[in-house]
Amino acid sequence: YDYWVAKGYILIGDNLLALKDTFQAKATYKSIVDGYTKSPDDADDVKAIALEKYDALAAQENKLDQEMMEQKKKNMRQDEDSMENTRD
């Protein structure tokens, strides 16, 4: 029974991803990772699948965060250059 509940939650997470609700999808996968105990008849290793999907989303978020930080740094440098040029 727990196996099918966890499989259902993975499906919900996948649907949330398709709807571009990454925050809820990540939380759904995390809930499986934190709360599911693998049973002997779990041939798919649902917990490992959820962890893989969670890690992929976390890596994607980290990449986006890094890109945003680089863009902010670039914008700050441009602003500083603009301010220096207006002083001259």
Image (cartoon, rainbow, N blue to C red):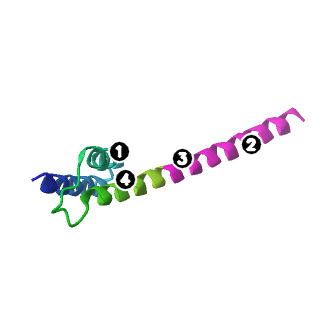
Closer to viewer: mark 2 or mark 3: 3
Identify the element where label 4 is drawn. Answer: helix
- Report which quarter residue 48 is drawn in: bottom left
Indicate which disc residue 65 carries.
Answer: 3
Identify the element where label 1 is drawn. Answer: helix
Which residue: 25% across, 44% down?
35
For the residue pair 34 and 82, the one nearer the viewer reads as 34
Which residue: 44% across, 51% down?
58
Indicate which disc residue 23 carries.
Answer: 1
Span shown in magenta = 62-88
Report x, y in % for residue 65.
Answer: 54, 47
Report x, y in % for residue 62.
Answer: 51, 50
Mark 3 / mark 1, whichever is N-terminal? 1
Q: Is residue 23 left or right of residue 71?
A: left
Q: CA distance from mark 4 to mark 2?
A: 35 Å
Residue 80 magenta-highlighted: yes
Report x, y in % for residue 51.
Answer: 35, 55
Is disc 1 in contact with disc 4, using a CB cutoff of under 8 Å? no
